[in-house]
Amino acid sequence: MSSFRNFTFSTIGITHSCYKEKFGIPRQPGLVSEATARIELIAPYNRLDTLDGLEQFSHIWVQFIFHACLNEKWKAKVRPPRLGGKEKLGVFATRSTHRPNPIGLSVIKLGKIYQEEKKVFIDLHGADLLDGTPIIDIKPYLPYADSLANAQGGFAPSPSPVMDVCFSPLANQQCQDYKALHNRDIASLIKQIVQQDPRPSYLVGQVDREHGTTVWDINVKWCARDDHMEILYLENMETS
């Protein structure tokens, strides 16, 4: 008879991400290519030799903990956003964050690996990780094994269509000022986030309601119009 065991995993790193809250994070990695993040390895794993050879790969698998959902109970059936929140499926048929074990898995484009003031970092591009996310493992992505040409995508065979996004004159100027000050193309990042329509399913269809999404140190105010999304203005979180 098989024995059942509980396991304890060590955190190997912590995520520093442009996403400061869950609302606005894309539902899959790679959808927002402008999103930047980095993993800071922690002791005793904060050694460059643990990453020796990883620079040869373009992408990595990152296993992490849904730490912002630890106080939320798992459910046997959930409502996937791709189905508009109108249909329930089994939790193991989805990528819901509300799972018996709150473990996430993302394939992410690998950036620079470097040491800075005795700290070891891994830059990530297009990550879907919340700031502060605990990392429990990193593995190289192998194209010949991890990409299957004939695989079926179930109820999510391809990315959802994106929305058109426009900026108000005020928001456009604020984005230009932010880029000049911080050397970050925040306008492109905002556009890629909002065009995915991060609203919960029960709000889809409502227009002219103001929403706020925090990226870096900015609270982006936007709303849905009849046929597009509009970026209204940027609010500096440090001075608001």
Image (cartoon, rainbow, N blue to C red):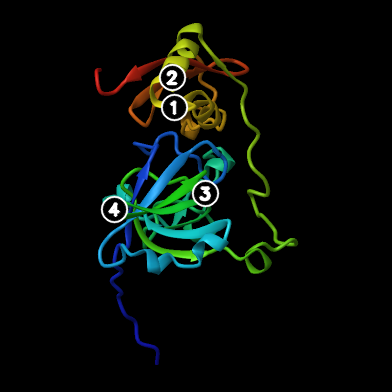
Tell me, yes or no, whether the two marked residues, 1 and 2, touch with CB atoms within 8 Å: yes
Q: Locate the N terminus and report the quarter of the image it occupies.
A: bottom left
Which residue in the protein does label 2 denote?
A: 180
Amino acid type, residue under disc 2 in the picture: Ala
- Whichever of callouts 4 and 2 sits on the residue coming sooner in the sequence is 4
- Whichever of callouts 1 and 4 sits on the residue coming sooner in the sequence is 4
Nearer the observer: mark 3 or 2; the answer is 2
- Whichever of callouts 3 and 2 sits on the residue coming sooner in the sequence is 3
Q: CA distance from mark 1 to mark 4?
A: 35 Å
Q: Residue at x 35, y 45 (%)?
A: 16
Which residue in the protein does label 4 denote?
A: 70
Residue 153 rendering spot, x and y as whole percentages: 66, 54
Q: Locate the C terminus and report the quarter of the image it occupies.
A: top left
Q: For label 2, count other residues whose C-alpha is less than 10 Å away and answer few (under 14), some (14-19) or many (20+).
A: few
Q: Is residue 129 above or below residue 54?
A: above
Amino acid type, residue under disc 3 in the picture: Lys
Instruction: Give whichever of 155, 138 is nearer the camera.
Output: 138
SS type, badge 2: helix
Q: CA distance from mark 1 to mark 2?
A: 6 Å
Which residue in the protein does label 1 denote?
A: 183
